[in-house]
C-alpha cells in the first residue's frame, strides 16, 4: 500500500527568537506568515528547513544565538524543532525496522543542547506516535556465553536513535528560497530547478532515439552522436601535437616526480560532455516578442525570481525530477517584483499547493494575500520577548470579505500588515478619515494604522472578525443611517450587532453623524 503521509504541524521551542510556537500545515493551502520585522517569520522558515535537512543546513552546527534568550538575558539550555506527520492509516506513514518490531514514524525533530561546561551539540531523530525518539538496534543481543567470552570486544547489543537518513526515500524535497540566494538556487545548487531541468534535457539528448534533418538526408540520433563522440576520442588521442610533443614531455616530467615511468592519456568522458551540455542550457527569455532573447543571468533580480518559480512549476510536469513530496519555503518572494507579478506568484503558489506541495512563505506584501483564494494566514506578534500567532483560514472567512477581495484586485489586505485598522464603508469615508488624521497632524502611516474601505456596512463585520482572529486592534466606523422615523436602518443595526460580537477590550465601534433620510427627503 502507498506511503501517503502529509506534513501536519511544526513545533518550535526555544529556537532563536521563538520561545514556543506551533504552526499547523493544511493540505492544499499555502501557509502565509505575516507580521512586523523581527516577529519570527524567518525563524519559522529556518526551523522547517533545519528539521527537514535542507541543503543549506547539511553542515550546520548550532551556536549560542540559536538558543532562545528571554528579556532578562537567561539563555535556554535546549531547543527543539519538530515536524509532525499525518496519515489516514498506519501504513501510510514511513517506518523503520530494528530487530523485531517495525517502528512507524510520526515525525522528526532536531534537538540542541548546551551542557553546563558550555559544549553545544545537536541531534536529529525520528518520532513515534507518542512523540518519543525511536530507538532501534543494528546488532543482536549476545548469547550468555558469548557475552562473557567477548566482554572486552564491544560487540554487545547496542541501541541507536533512528535518523532522517533511515527514511530518506520518503522524505520531502526541500527548497529554502531567499531574496539573496536567487543566483545560487538557479545555477549553483545541484538540486536547483534550472539545474534539474537542464540536466534532464542533457540526459535525454544523449539517450532518446530521434531523427535530425540535415542537408541531403537524415541522421539517426543518438547513434550519430555516439559515432561522433567515438571519432572525437580517436582524434584527440591521435592528434600529432599531443602524441609527438606534449604527451612524451609530460610523461617524462611526471615520471621524474613519481620515480617510475608515467603514462598519460586523454580520454574524454561522456559524463563530462553531459555536464558541459547541461551548463550551456542557460535559459534566455524575451520579454517582448519583438526583442532578442536575453540570457537569464543578464536579467534583473525580479525576472530571475519569477523564472525561479516558473521553473518550479515546470518541474511538476516531469515527475522523475522531484519527489512526491515537496516543501517550498520562501522568504519575502515579493522582493524586486511589481504588484502584478506578486499577484502572479500568489496564484502559482496556490496551484503548487493544490498539487500537493507544502508551501510556507513570509511576506510584507498585501498582493500575496487573497481572501478569495485558499490560504492559511498566520500573523506573528512579538510581545515581551515572546512570539504569539493569530490564524485565519480563508475558506472560513465571511463571504462579504471574500467578495470585496474579488471585486478589488488589491483586496484591501494592507490592514493585515498594520498594528491597528480603521474599517469604514466606502472610499469617501476612507478619504474623510485620512483627512481627519491630516488635520490633527497624526502620522497614521508612521504608526502603522491602516484605513480600509470595506465596500458597504454589511462587509465591515467580516473584516473585524479577521482582525480579531489575528490580534489586530480595530475601529469600525459606520454611517448613522437613520430612517424618517428616527430609527436605524435594519441592515446597519444588524451589522453593528455583528461588529460588537468581535469586539475586544482594545477595539472600538463609532458612527459618523450624518444627514438622516428624513432631512434628505
Image (cartoon, rainbow, N blue to C red):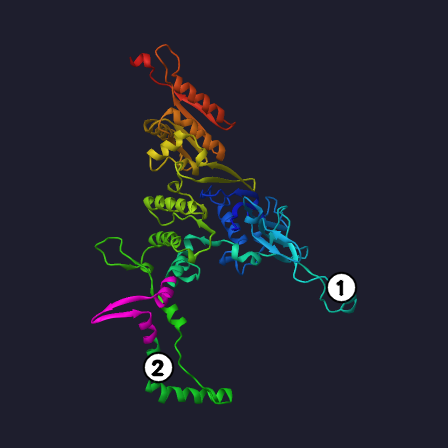
How many numbered circles does the render carry?
A: 2
Q: Is residue 203 a member of the stretch shown in magenta? A: yes
Residue range of the region highlighted in magenta in the rendering: 200-228
Residue found farthest to the top = 485
Which residue is more in the foreground, 375 or 389? 375
- Quadrant containing the C terminus in the rendered view: top left
Q: Quick one: SS at disc 2?
A: helix
CA neighbours of label 1 inside 10 A, class few (<14), some (14 to 19), many (20+): few
First of labels 1, 2 by sequence position: 1
Secondary structure beneath dot 1 equals loop
Callouts 1 and 2 close, C-beta under 8 Å: no
Closer to the camera in the image, 267 or 19: 267
User: Does the image show residue 103?
Assistant: yes
Placement of 29 over or under 112, stated as above or below:
above
Q: Residue furthest front?
A: 1
In this rendering, is residue 96 above or below 13? below
Which label was assigned to residue 491?
Answer: none
Name the residue at 58% across, 56% down: 63
Whole-percent x, y for residue 493 in the image:
42, 18
Of tags 1 and 2, the one toward the viewer is: 1
Q: Position of residue 279 (x, y in %)?
A: 36, 66
Quick check: 111 above or below 28? below
Asked where in the image residue 370 lies, by quadrant, the reply is: top left
Residue 323 drawn at (x, y percent): 46, 55
Q: Give the labeled residue for mark 1.
A: 143
Report if residue 317 lies within the magenta region: no
Q: Position of residue 504 (x, y in %)?
A: 51, 27
Image-based side of 341 in relation to 23, left or right? left
Q: Which mark is residue 234?
A: 2
- For marks 1 and 2, give the CA distance: 63 Å
Left or right placement of residue 178 versus residue 83 in this view: left
Amino acid at each position: 500500500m502507498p506511503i501517503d503521509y502529509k506534513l501536519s504541524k511544526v513545533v518550535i521551542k526555544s529556537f532563536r527568537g521563538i520561545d514556543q510556537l506551533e504552526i499547523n500545515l493544511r493540505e492544499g493551502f499555502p501557509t502565509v506568515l505575516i507580521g512586523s520585522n523581527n516577529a519570527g517569520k524567518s525563524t519559522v522558515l529556518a526551523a522547517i528547513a533545519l528539521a527537514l535537512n535542507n541543503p543549506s543546513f547539511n553542515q550546520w552546527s548550532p551556536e549560542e544565538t540559536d538558543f532562545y534568550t528571554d528579556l532578562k538575558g537567561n539563555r535556554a539550555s535546549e531547543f527543539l524543532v519538530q515536524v509532525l506527520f499525518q496519515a489516514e492509516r498506519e501504513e501510510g506513514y514511513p517506518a523503520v525496522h530494528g530487530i523485531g518490531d517495525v517502528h512507524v514514524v510520526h515525525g522528526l525533530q532536531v534537538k540542541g543542547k548546551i551542557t553546563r561546561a558550555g559544549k553545544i551539540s545537536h541531534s536529529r531523530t525520528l518520532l513515534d506516535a507518542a512523540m518519543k525518539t525511536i530507538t532501534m538496534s543494528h546488532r543482536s543481543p549476545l548469547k550468555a556465553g558469548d557475552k562473557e567470552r567477548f566482554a572486552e570486544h564491544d560487540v554487545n547489543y547496542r541501541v541507536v536513535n533512528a535518523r532522517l537518513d533511515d527514511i530518506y526515500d520518503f522524505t520531502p524535497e526541500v527548497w529554502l528560497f531567499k531574496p539573496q540566494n536567487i543566483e545560487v538556487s538557479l545555477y549553483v545548487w545541484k538540486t536547483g530547478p534550472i539545474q534539474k531541468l537542464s540536466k534532464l534535457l542533457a540526459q535525454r539528448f544523449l539517450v532518446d532515439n530521434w531523427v535530425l534533418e540535415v542537408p541531403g538526408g537524415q541522421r539517426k540520433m543518438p547513434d550519430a552522436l555516439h559515432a561522433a563522440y567515438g571519432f572525437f576520442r580517436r582524434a584527440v588521442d591521435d592528434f600529432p601535437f599531443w602524441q609527438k610533443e606534449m604527451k612524451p614531455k609530460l610523461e617524462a616530467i611526471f615520471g621524474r616526480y613519481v620515480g617510475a615511468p608515467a603514462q598519460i592519456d586523454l580520454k574524454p568522458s561522456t559524463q563530462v560532455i553531459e555536464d558541459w551540455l547541461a551548463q550551456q542550457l542557460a535559459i534566455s527569455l524575451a520579454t517582448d516578442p519583438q526583442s532578442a532573447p536575453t540570457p537569464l543571468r543578464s536579467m534583473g533580480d525580479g525576472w530571475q525570481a519569477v523564472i525561479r518559480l516558473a521553473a518550479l512549476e515546470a518541474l511538476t510536469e516531469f515527475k522523475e525530477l522531484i519527489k512526491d513530496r515537496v516543501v517550498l519555503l520562501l522568504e519575502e518572494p515579493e522582493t524586486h517584483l511589481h504588484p502584478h507579478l506578486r499577484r502572479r506568484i500568489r496564484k502559482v503558489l496556490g496551484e503548487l499547493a493544490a498539487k500537493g506541495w507544502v508551501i510556507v512563505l513570509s511576506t510584507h506584501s498585501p498582493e500575496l494575500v487573497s481572501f478569495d483564494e485558499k490560504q492559511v494566514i498566520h500573523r506573528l506578534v512579538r510581545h515581551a520577548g515572546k512570539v504569539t500567532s493569530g490564524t485565519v483560514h480563508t475558506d472560513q472567512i465571511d463571504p462579504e470579505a471574500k467578495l470585496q477581495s474579488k471585486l478589488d484586485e488589491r483586496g484591501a489586505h494592507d490592514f493585515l500588515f498594520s498594528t491597528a485598522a480603521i474599517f469604514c464603508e466606502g472610499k469617501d469615508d476612507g478619504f474623510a478619515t485620512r483627512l481627519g488624521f491630516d488635520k490633527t497632524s497624526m502620522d497614521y502611516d508612521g504608526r502603522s494604522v491602516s484605513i480600509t474601505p470595506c465596500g458597504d456596512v454589511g462587509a465591515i463585520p467580516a473584516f473585524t472578525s479577521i482582525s480579531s482572529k489575528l490580534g489586530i486592534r480595530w475601529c469600525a466606523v459606520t454611517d448613522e443611517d437613520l430612517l424618517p422615523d428616527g430609527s436605524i436602518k435594519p441592515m446597519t443595526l444588524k451589522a453593528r450587532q455583528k461588529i460588537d460580537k468581535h469586539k475586544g477590550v482594545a477595539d472600538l465601534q463609532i458612527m459618523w453623524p450624518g444627514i438622516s433620510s428624513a432631512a434628505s427627503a
